[in-house]
Image (cartoon, coloured by chain):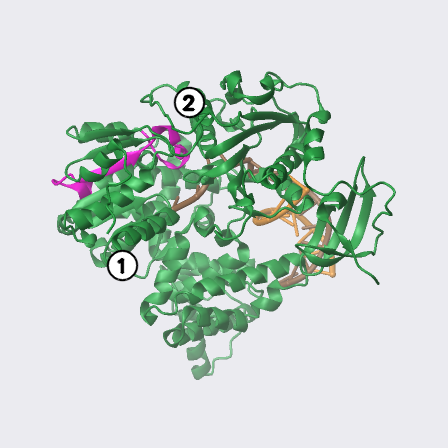
Chain colours: A green, B brown, C orange
Amino acid sequence: MTNILADLNPAQREAVTTVHGPVLVLAGPGSGKTRVLTQRVAYLVRECDVQPYRVMAVTFTNKAASEMRTRIERLLGGQLRGLTIGTFHATCARILRREAAEAGINPGYVIYDGDDQLRALRQVLKDLNLDEKRYRPRAMRAFISRAKCDLLTPQAVEPKTHPEEVARRVYERYQALLEANDALDFGDLLLRMVLLFEKESGVLEKYQSRYLFLMVDEFQDTNTAQYRLVKMLAGERRNLCVVADEDQSIYRFRGADYRNIRRFREDFPEHKLLLLERNYRSTQTILDAANAIIAVSPWRTPKRLHTDKGAGPLLTVFEAYNEGEEASYVVNEIARLTAQGRTTLGGCAVMYRTNAQSRALEDAFIFGNMPYKLVGATRFYARREIRDALAYLRLIHNPHDSVSLGRIINVPRRGIGARTTAALAQWANRMGVSQHEALLMLREEHGKKGREGNEDTGGAACAGRQAASAIPFGTRARKQLLIFLESLEGWREARADLTVAQILDQVLEETAYEGWIRDGTEQGEDRWANLMELRTVAADYDPLPQETALTTFLEEVALVSEVDDLPEAADASTLLTLHSAKGLEFDVVFIVGMEEGILPHSRSFDDPEQMEEERRLCYVGITRARERLYLLHAFRRSRYGADDLNAPSRFLVDIPRRLVQGKGKSQGLAAPRRTATWRPALKVSPAPSPTPRSEPQLAIGQRVRHALFGEGTVIESKLTKDDEEVKVAFPGKGIKKLLASFAKLQKLGD
DNA sequence: AAGTTTCTACTTTTT
DNA sequence: GTAGAAACTT
């Protein structure tokens, strides 16, 4: 058995072994805090005879949680039954499911994400006769989410302005809709948990006495609801260990409040404070740059990060002419560094402020025939086809979910248009039942009518009997609705005998979804492939007991995050936002778009607090680098259509020149364009030298082979200054723009 | 109701 | 420069 405490520095060791009472670990980037947390759990279990099920560890992402679990299991050599490791949301979702009766929730509830929230809100705005232009669903969502983070129910909100009063009413109505749908949104998971603990002291005590030891990672990113939750759970015992780095607090916009650190210090005055300042990741040069950026920030506990690693290479600051040149510079540098054996493709990452910036980079990677993996962009679970499929599954699981119903009732097209869906929603509303129940009533009426042999057209005959159930549909609409209901009821019955994957198959089959989505375009193929990918994920749930498989699948799918489904294996560079970079590390990091208006983002200009957050975001990016750091900005950048000229980021100015290669010629205000700057990189690049001018150009119609895309046909070709740019159609892969010198296209006969 | 075209907002970050 | 909604037509 390995000694759990070996290889820990004194501060780390103390953080691991101080298991009783509150502990605050202030941990700089790369200081081994994940290590501390895993060793601490292992220490509790092995050295202190604590049963795993008495420990709860909360992490920020599911990925962090499963990594931690794996590492602990490796340390202890065995499965840890009953250990609770997960995100706040996942943990609350599970407890609420278990305590559904006490919480007054249907245990089969579904979880609404941001997109579902918007759909629900649009319905609410329609019901309240509010103009979507004046009361933006997104603004309403932000208002509601903020309220929930602050533990405010609609009744508790105190509107200060008229628009806030309207938002409060929307919140109230929205909440009623969710309740009717047996749905909880992300905010509800936390809010309802807190409310349950406050209302039912017995339930709280049950969990307090189960969880003797609590740990929270990324504590600076907790919101008020989350703070309240851990404080309640810690109870009298106060065995609560939180790990925080206020310099990496980057989620203020979704309610995170790094002041929870201060709150912790006040609420747990007897806490032990531990500082992890030794960095095991980066060179001193990178740490100095990071310190220079963050030291400017007020109100922070100063930390002095240090490392045993040497100075390492200087930083590179580079001004490109535009985003295209910025991207090709990155690709060239990665090619050069990997060819020199200084790193691997997987050791390189490119980080940016907004997802939209990934496009130019992707183009450059494809141009250069360099493998890359993209984190985020259009999240897998945000894709339309995936959401459609999940809506079907959710509806089968919980027919009250009218948001899902509204999503797929006419997808694929089945003759139920906007008019009919609006009428159905209104009708159900008026009768105070869910849309599914309304459909069941419609069927009943229909059957009755048939038996009575009543041959009226339209719903007039029923109107006299029951005003509330006057059926607002024409014959055709009614027929289509009943056909839809039959399908749904069929799946719901079949559900008991089928696995999740089989239910999905059946839905796709019976709705002819494949034909609907596979329309012969490249996009259609992608979408179908995504669905098959979803099917693979669903098949993972086959071994679970039949009754819980669908519930578990839907819950886990609702709570996965961006970085969670990062493919590990492939040797490819990573493209990701600065936000999703947190917690990761790479040999070489490129931060692109270091410009005023991009990083810092223009939305932060008028709010000093938000500007500080931009600074921390920059700090997070820098501290991801182990060896080499490149900071890039472009003289000119096109942002949705128009061209902008952006000054270099103010954060660049804070970096001491001695840390920067080439004496920072490009620092200061926007310099005139110097395209020559990046050409040398192209020359030393290991990529094959550009096709000699004499070589016959690739003609339109020429068949070619590409290493990544296979065989294709040239459909467009134009000569640029010193190369040839071609568009090639690859069957099944779509049309790609390629640079002849990089793409290594092999000409094929015929 | 479905298929077109036109318009518009979008691009901050996500459990 | 695009995706999704709204406004049109068939």
Three-letter amino acid code at the position of disc 2: Asn
Q: Chain of mark 1?
A: A
Q: Which mark is residue A641?
A: none
Q: Is residue A321 magenta?
A: no
User: Pointer 1 and pointer 2: residues touching (CB < 8 Å)?
Assistant: no
Give the residue pinned by disc 1: A79
Q: Residue at x 67, y 30 (%)?
A: A322
Q: Chain of mark 2?
A: A
Q: Residue at x 47, y 83 (%)?
A: A453
Q: CA distance from mark 1 to mark 2?
A: 41 Å
Whole-percent x and y of residue A133?
53, 39
Nearer to us in this view, A131 or A88: A88
Q: Secondary structure at mark 1?
A: loop
Magenta segment, which residues?
A232-258
- Does residue A550 appear in the picture of this structure? yes
Q: Earlier in the sequence, mark 1 or mark 2?
A: 1
Q: Residue at x 35, y 35 (%)?
A: A256
Q: Is residue A246 magenta?
A: yes
Nearer to us in this view, A93 or A451: A93
Give the residue pinned by disc 2: A291
Whole-percent x and y of residue A551?
35, 63
Whole-percent x and y of residue A47?
16, 47
Three-letter amino acid code at the position of disc 1: Gln
Above or below, comparing residue A256 to residue A428 in the picture? above
Do circles 1 and 2 both sit on a common chain?
A: yes
- Does residue A174 appear in the picture of this structure? no
